[in-house]
Amino acid sequence: MRRLAKIAVCLFALAAVVACESTSIEVIDSTANLRSTTVKGQDKNCAVVLRAQQGTSYTLTIESEDSWATFSGSKTEVEGTMDVTDKVVYIYFDRNKTGVERQANLFVHFSDGITAELSFTQLTYDATIAFEREWAELPLCKDENDYIFNTHYGVLGVRTNARNYTFCFDPSVRASLWVAYPLHSAHTTGSANRNNSRFGYDPTVSTSSQANMGAGSYSGWYDRGHQIPAADRKCSQQMMDQTFYATNMTPQQANFNQNKWANLEGRVRGMVCSDTLYVVTGAYFDGQHDSSIATKTTDKSGNTCPTPSHYYKALLRTSKGNTGKRISEINEASELRGIAFWFTHSNTGENTTITSQDCISIEELERRTGFTFFPSINDSIESEVKSNIEPSVWGVY
């Protein structure tokens, strides 16, 4: 009897624990918020942050005069189901060149009966500004040709919102003309694994403008070539995953990508310093194509994707590497070191050789591409830094 009594007590205690655990399960109230209720005139998207129990379905409807604000695919209504508790849906629009502020209204309906009415205002567009940040790697972002500028952020050490990379996306070629990013040992050290990453659309750009990378690579012998390499972001899976967005891809000839270009990427990682190495990787589409490269290919959706005629990298760092100074704080040209690499896009076979013949000055790269690189360099030393070219100090001969 005593044994039965003990068993009964144990069962009662266990039932109490289970009951306690069942009542402690978090109940998530469905909510919807705009990441910003006021966006700049040059901005091209606005994020809607949804939070709800997994399995909850939702409907988003947007109303705006002349339908200036829509979801991807020019839709004014989207539906979905929460496969995670927190989800972001983007609203897309063009620069506001109307001369007056404009407002859009968003209506959210969750299947649990919760509703929300939100609105945001887009300010008027300032034609002199496209994208500005005080980051040493960022080229001058001119407002021209409907380029789309954006930055991705992610986990870096204890920071949850560190900048990853910025891109200049050209919808006419379904690719970014350049991708700019800081590079430090903190970025290249970690356990992130590219096998856990998936190619896909960039959520900050309308899918109709991007190449479909999730379904497979480009037609022909062209890889989905990263501009910022996945191996440059081993610091966190989130940052590495972002390097697999279509805005970071170009159709890159397989041998070139896997041999010569891969060698350069590895060597650049070896050039980092405590002060940070600043990198701009770019694809140039307007030059003479090598005979081994077609001028265009297609993605798996049949979209035409022009191929770059050339590829380049521009690098800038302090000479000593451990000054603790910002680039903008340096007033002596000898304290900075800059160089650019320029390659004709071609089938290079298994050749991995990088020589001084592949190097040009940053000044020459600006002349060829039309972009202004590293504008944070002090005006008094800019010309000297950008015109100087010493491949040997970068270990290139």
Image (cartoon, rainbow, N blue to C red):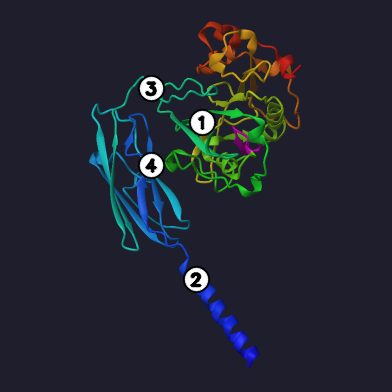
SS label for mark 4: loop
| Highlighted magenta segment, given as a residue range | 221-233
Q: Residue at label 1?
A: 166
The residue under the point 50% across, 43% down is 201
Q: Are marks 1 and 4 in contact (CB under 8 Å)?
A: no
* CA separation in Å, label 2 and label 1: 48 Å
Q: Are marks 2 and 1 in contact (CB under 8 Å)?
A: no
Mark 1 vs mark 4, foreground winner is: 4
On residue 35, which mark appears? 4
Q: Residue at label 2?
A: 20
Q: Position of residue 170 (x, y in %)?
A: 46, 30
On residue 129, which mark appears? 3
* CA separation in Å, label 1 and label 4: 19 Å
* CA separation in Å, label 4 and label 2: 36 Å
Q: Quadrant of the N terminus?
A: bottom right
Amino acid under label 4?
Arg
Tag 1 or tag 2, which sits nearer the N-term?
Answer: 2
